[in-house]
Amino acid sequence: MPQEADLLPGTLDLLILKVLSSGAHHGYGILLRIPAITEGALTVE
């Protein structure tokens, strides 16, 4: 799993936009979708 320093700046922003492109989600829904769309490579605490 990549460490925080290994991620390019803006990666989380783009993942959030990708989640929201499929429809409206609240914060917790976004939190749950990010590991799913990254196939477990990234989790958000």
Image (cartoon, grey):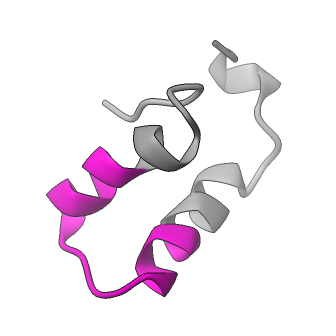
Vertically, is 10 above or below 17? above
Please state the horizontal and vertical placement of residue 6, each as a whole percent of the image: 80, 23
Give the quarter of the image for residue 42: top right
Question: Residue at left 30%, top 49%?
Answer: 31
Magenta residues, dominant SS class? helix
Please check the rendered image and state whether residue 36 is part of the magenta-colored stretch, yes or no.
no
Please state the horizontal and vertical placement of residue 8, each as a whole percent of the image: 82, 42
Vertically, is 10 above or below 18? above
Drawn side of residue 39 relative to residue 34, left or right: right
Q: Quadrant of the C terminus?
A: top left
Please state the horizontal and vertical placement of residue 28, each as a whole percent of the image: 17, 55
Question: Residue at left 50%, top 27%?
Answer: 40
Q: Quadrant of the N terminus?
A: top right
Give the quarter of the image for residue 22: bottom left
Vertically, is 26 above or below 39? below
Please check the rendered image and state whether residue 20 is part of the magenta-colored stretch, yes or no.
yes
Q: Which residues are magenta?
A: 17-33
Please state the horizontal and vertical placement of residue 26, each as a whole percent of the image: 18, 72
Give the quarter of the image for residue 41: top right
Drawn side of residue 3 relative to residue 18, left or right: right
Q: How many marks?
A: 0
Between 39 and 30, the one nearer to me in the picture: 39
